[in-house]
Image (cartoon, rainbow, N blue to C red):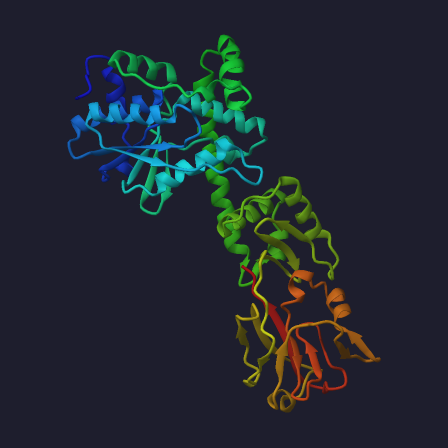
Amino acid sequence: MAASRKTQPELADSLIKHWPDELSGLFAFEVGLSGGLDSVALLSLLCEARERRPALALSAVHVHHGLSPNADAWAEHCRALCDSLGVPLRIERVQVRAGGGESVEAAAREARYAVYRGSSAGVIALAHHQDDQAETVLLQLLRGGGARALAAMPALRELAPGKRLWRPLLEIPRARLEAYVRERGLSWVDDESNLDTRYRRNLLRHDILPLLERALPHYRSHLARAAMLQADAAAILDEVARQDLGACRTESGLDCARLLALSAPRRRQVLLAWLEALGWPAPEPGALLEFLRQAEHADQGASPVLTLPQGCLLRFADTVQAWPKALDEPPAFTALLWRGGDAQPLPEWGGELAWEWRDRGLPEALLASGASLAPRRGGEKLSARVGRREVKDLFREAGVPPLLRRRWPLLYGADGELLAVPGIAVSHRLAMEAGWWPAWRPASL
């Protein structure tokens, strides 16, 4: 059944007039259809757009969470609506499992977006409107969010490679959508959980925002404008952070001197951009500030560490490095093929063994006679100017963090004597006036 255009034609006209240029060559659109008023309005509006753009292939998806006793009835309502509008519908059943302090609401959202990412359509259209945007800005503000959080929901973004998420109703208040749906004679379902004011969004919607509206009737558009301005600010921050990150990057992490030469806010943005590129979530702001403070003021031998769920950030020597939480065990033994001082990549150890010619180092004949690498097992000692030093003490004095010590290779001679702790010390007994000094360069993410 074609949607009537006898009432509120300006809403459909506005939708088509403001069709994003980025979507002009895309014709397969799928609506996220909950069955609620907002998504019913969006589906109807896109049906009107389909009448005027016959090439538009329109479908809908309903995600069945199974969380409400009415979930089956909602799915059937969506099926009946789509049949009446001539829109293909797929119903996807998901299991919502919240874990690790995650709310059921957040877990349900992630389940929905997983379904959207699996769509065959090039565009997923969602029905978030101006009221939703205003609520999101306030929620993020109450959480202490920065510019990116206060930018709230973008109208258009990439959802997955070759797939875009579109929110065409962000400038339209819910009241206008309700008038549109009522005039069309369309029905919708109400999720009973939306009345539960234990959820912050519902508390804002039902108890706080009606009071605000009495004093500031246009608060929605004001907050939407604020979100737009914050989106601009966030885009500028991201652009500067990417430039700074490129200037600070090295093969093993971030150049500490270049990082610390930046202003404090830019340092934070660089680390956040780096973590985002690694796919790691942002740390708690206070923890990030403390890590940067320690990285700036720590003694040369110290190695500040910021522990995160995915791994660790640490300052080691002149770099800030990122190491995953689960590191592979190093090999028990690696024969070393002497290559006349050429650096040797050792991915199984997680780094590279380089060689430097120094005033005091190991003789080439000794290295060529059959040297090898092995991990520390405990109790190892290295010949020093006076007596022998325990390797664990050398590690501690050099500021090597415990995370790296178990993957730090020790260099042995053919007779099994410890020749060096690469990058830290060589055997005093075996060293010559001039010789080769091994340097270990761990490769972080």
Residue sitting at the far left: 54
Q: Is residue 413 left or right of residue 141?
A: right
Q: Residue at x 31, y 46 (%)?
A: 162
Whether residue 177 is visible here, answered yes or no, is yes
For the N terminus, give its image quadrant: top left
Q: Is residue 407 left or right of residue 70?
A: right
Whether residue 17 is visible here, answered yes or no, is no
Residue 325: where, in percent of width, then height?
A: 59, 56
Quarter of the rendering containing residue 341:
bottom right
Up-down relation of residue 19 to residue 215 (above or below): below
Q: Residue at x 56, y 32 (%)?
A: 145
Quarter of the rendering containing residue 156:
top left
Residue 93: where, in percent of width, then height?
A: 36, 36
Residue 31: where, in percent of width, then height?
A: 30, 31
Q: Residue at x 58, y 37 (%)?
A: 101
Q: How many marks?
A: 0
Up-down relation of residue 330 to residue 278 (above or below): below
Residue sitting at the far right: 386
- The residue nearer to you, when weighing 226 against 85, is 85
Up-down relation of residue 354 to residue 2 (above or below): below
Quarter of the rendering containing residue 133:
top left
- The residue nearer to you, when weighing 428 against 118, is 118
Residue sitting at the far top: 214
Residue 389: where, in percent of width, then height?
A: 79, 75
Up-down relation of residue 133 to residue 96 (above or below): above
